[in-house]
């Protein structure tokens, strides 16, 4: 009798184990499912609507706000294009197109590609070069002859077909950041991304947490992060942009895209506001 009872207990335990195994999923699968449901419920804002530039402001060096010099920023085939088809030679007129609102805590997704040739006599460093400027000053506050908005630049670079050239790098026009506890004063710092040669589309994301941490991603993989974005007191626009309370940390700002002499297409620019 005792032997029979022990056998029954063993069978019951085995059935329970089987049932639990059949009705549960690996942790990775549960995480993926939860992420899928969460993603479906997220309210992404389409900064670029695929039709027009009504929600954007344009500023070129040496030109008043709103002057779309040589029709550089345009909408074609559902894409926001930085086009140099109506230019002759490069003349140093850097351009930026600003979204109408400022943001602080968010995720920004962008799909871009570099196409064609660089405009004649464009600077060598600007070959297949563009940027997503975040935590930037307003378009209205830029000086007439200012090259770049004071901001944190998420630098976009394309390969030349031969050399290694990372993208989603960091550049700091008029700003600094902290990395591994150290204040970084150099202008540009490379990410750990691979090189993207040719005219291929690249999907990137920036995760911004106010004046705290900023992360760069390519295809969902983090390639760089840094902290405490802040104004650089050495910059000539520092006094103008420093708030009355003297706080140098940048916790919000504009989002803009560049025109630096190479044709660039953007087919997705969307943003998800995050809780602070």
Image: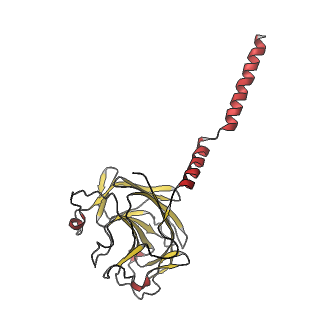
Can residue 65 be seen here? yes
Q: Residue 3 at what x, y percent from top left?
A: 77, 13
Q: In the rendered view of the protein, which quadrant contains the N terminus? A: top right
State the count of labels. 0
Q: Residue 136 at what x, y percent from top left?
A: 34, 66
Residue 207 vs 85, above or below: the answer is above
Q: Residue 263 at what x, y percent from top left?
A: 47, 78
Can residue 206 be seen here? no
Rendered image coloring scheme: secondary structure
> Which residue appears at 42% of the width and 87% of the height?
87
Quarter of the view holding residue 67 = bottom left
Q: Is residue 134 left or right of residue 204?
A: left
> Which residue appears at 56% of the width and 78% of the height?
77
Q: Is residue 163 left or right of residue 24?
A: left
Q: Residue 167 at what x, y percent from top left?
A: 45, 65
Residue 60 vs 111, above or below: the answer is below
Quarter of the view holding residue 100 = bottom left
> Which residue appears at 60% of the width and 44% of the height?
30
């Amino acid at each position: 009798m005792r032997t029979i009872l022990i056998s029954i207990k063993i069978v019951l335990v085995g059935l329970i184990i089987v049932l639990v195994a059949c009705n549960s999923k690996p942790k990775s699968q549960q995480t993926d499912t939860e992420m899928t449901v969460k993603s479906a419920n997220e309210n992404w804002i389409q900064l670029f609507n695929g039709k027009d530039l009504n929600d954007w402001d344009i500023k070129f060096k040496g030109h008043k706000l709103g002057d779309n010099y040589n029709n550089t920023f345009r909408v074609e085939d559902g894409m926001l294009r930085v086009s140099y088809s109506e230019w002759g030679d490069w003349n140093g007129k850097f351009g930026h197109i600003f979204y109408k609102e400022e943001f602080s805590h968010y995720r920004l997704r962008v799909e871009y590609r570099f196409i064609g040739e660089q405009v004649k006599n464009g600077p060598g460093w600007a070959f297949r070069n563009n940027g997503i400027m975040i935590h930037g000053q307003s378009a209205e506050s830029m000086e007439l002859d200012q090259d770049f908005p004071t901001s944190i630049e998420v630098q976009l670079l394309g390969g030349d077909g031969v050399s290694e050239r990372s993208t989603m790098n960091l550049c700091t026009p008029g700003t600094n950041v902290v990395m591994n506890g150290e204040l970084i004063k150099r202008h540009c710092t490379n990410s750990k991304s691979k090189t993207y040669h040719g005219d291929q589309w690249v999907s990137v994301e920036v995760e911004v947490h106010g004046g705290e941490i900023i992360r760069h991603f390519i295809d969902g993989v983090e390639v760089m992060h840094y902290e405490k974005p802040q104004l650089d007191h050495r910059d000539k626009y520092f006094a103008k942009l420093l708030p009355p309370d003297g706080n140098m940390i940048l916790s919000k700002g504009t989002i803009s895209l560049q025109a630096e002499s190479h044709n660039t297409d953007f087919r997705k620019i969307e943003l998800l506001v995050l809780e602070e």
